[in-house]
């Protein structure tokens, strides 16, 4: 009889595809165990999942922390209802509950943001006063920094829901992570893709992480085989920056770490903090050693925080 390994995830179409990606990689990297193990995907509803009754409530109005998307999954992991969990790392709080750990970070998908619009192919070409739908303060701030004449309105739901809302003219454009569009196989829906110099992604955007109980050596061994070291280092740097800046859904923060194959011992971290209306943006870049990615993130985050006025995020 096969042993069942239960892999927990959110229940959205994208989350289920991401869980299937993880399941496939785990089995591919453990071919000898396929006759004795079976990985079962377990969908779990979370507080942050969009429901029609939410209408267009923003994350702030719902309580505004990244834990909205992970709390119930982490509780299921701690109580042995599931054996592993797969998360989009941009949705994970920087404070991981005691007893849990991330055993693997998969190779990063394209971290950039994409514009979806039936009105214009690029943000710069939207008509004056056009409505851009997003629940992300980071995206809102950067949109208004580029085009202060646009109107940003809250817009939530999965990709299909948002496309329907665009068709119903609830907004003229929306912005989504290209990674999600690619995993869903609908990247062709993107009108254009933002260069990070114009729209810096969310910290840890494009990363999938496998979370396990800290004392589960068997799960740790399974997950270790699919860990992508370069992605892990970049993810650690970006999340350390968030910790230093007290980053959550309440603060407009962007971050992207990269490692140039020509200098694999170095990691470059670019970060951005902004006021909610995009009127002030602080953008900084710092390099560090790949051996100490968290030191790089914390150092840059602390330096940026020190140069901001105390009320910066309230402006």
Image (tube, grey):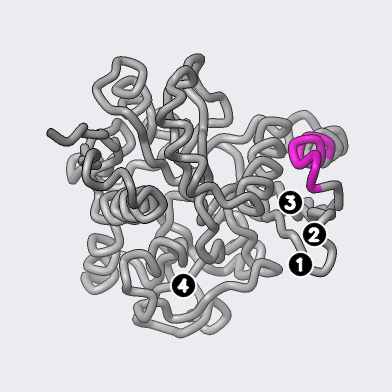
Name the front one of labels 3 and 2: 2
Give the structural element (helix, strand or loop) at label 4.
strand
Q: Which residue is mark 3?
A: 271
Residue at x 36%, y 64% (from the top left corner): 183
- Residue drawn at (20%, 40%), measured in percent from left and top? 40
Query: In terms of image quadrants, where is residue 43?
Result: top left
Spatial distance from mark 3 to mark 2, Cα to Cα?
20 Å
The mark nearer the N terminus, 1 or 3, is 1
Q: Quick one: label 1 or label 4, which is nearer the N terminus?
A: 4
Of residues 288 and 137, the one nearer the viewer is 288
Q: Work out how far the residue at label 4 is from the one at label 3, CA to CA, in angstroms.
A: 21 Å
Give the residue at mark 1.
261
Task: Residue 264: give its label.
Answer: 2
Q: Which residue is mark 4?
A: 115
Q: State if disc 1 and disc 2 touch (CB < 8 Å).
A: yes
Query: CA separation, marks 2 and 4?
Result: 32 Å
Magenta stretch encompasses residue 293: yes
x and y percentages locating residue 209 in the rendered image: 47, 43
Quadrant the N terminus occupies? top left
Q: Which of disc 2 and disc 3 is earlier in sequence?
A: 2
Q: Residue furthest left?
A: 1
Q: Is residue 64 among what the camera can see?
A: no
**In the rendered view, does 235 fall on the left or right side of 54?**
right
Residue at the far front: name it: 32
* Dot in front, 1 or 3: 1
Local crowd size for mark 1, using a 10 Å CA cut-off: few (<14), some (14–19), many (≥20): few
Q: Secondary structure at mark 1?
A: loop
Q: Secondary structure at mark 2?
A: loop
């Amino acid at each position: 009889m096969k042993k069942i390994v239960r892999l927990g995830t959110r229940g959205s179409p994208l989350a289920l595809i991401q869980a299937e990606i993880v399941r496939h990689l785990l089995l591919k990297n453990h071919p000898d165990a396929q006759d004795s193990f079976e990985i079962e995907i377990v969908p779990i509803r979370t507080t942050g999942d969009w429901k029609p009754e939410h209408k267009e409530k923003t994350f702030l109005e719902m309580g505004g922390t990244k834990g909205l998307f992970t709390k119930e999954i982490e509780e299921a992991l701690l109580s042995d209802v599931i054996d592993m969990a797969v998360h989009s790392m941009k949705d994970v709080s920087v404070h991981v509950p005691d007893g849990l750990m991330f055993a693997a970070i998969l190779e990063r998908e394209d971290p950039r943001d994409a514009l979806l619009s039936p009105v214009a192919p690029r943000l710069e070409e939207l008509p004056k006063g056009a409505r851009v739908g997003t629940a992300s303060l980071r995206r809102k701030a950067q949109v208004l920094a580029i085009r202060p004449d646009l109107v940003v309105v809250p817009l939530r739901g999965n990709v299909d829901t948002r496309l329907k809302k665009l068709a119903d003219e609830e907004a003229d454009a929306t912005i989504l992570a290209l990674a999600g569009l690619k995993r869903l196989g609908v990247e062709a829906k993107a009108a254009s893709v933002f260069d990070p110099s114009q729209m810096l992604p969310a910290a840890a955007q494009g990363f999938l992480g496998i979370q396990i109980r800290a004392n589960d050596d068997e799960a740790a061994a399974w997950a270790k085989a699919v860990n992508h070291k370069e992605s892990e280092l970049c993810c650690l740097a970006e999340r350390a920056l968030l910790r230093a800046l007290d980053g959550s859904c309440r603060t407009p923060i962007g971050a992207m770490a990269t490692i140039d194959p020509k200098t694999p011992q170095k990691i470059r971290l670019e970060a951005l903090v902004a006021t909610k209306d995009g009127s002030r943006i602080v953008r900084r870049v710092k390099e560090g050693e790949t051996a100490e990615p968290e030191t790089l993130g914390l150092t840059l985050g602390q330096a940026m925080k020190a140069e901001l006025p105390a009320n910066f995020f309230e402006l």
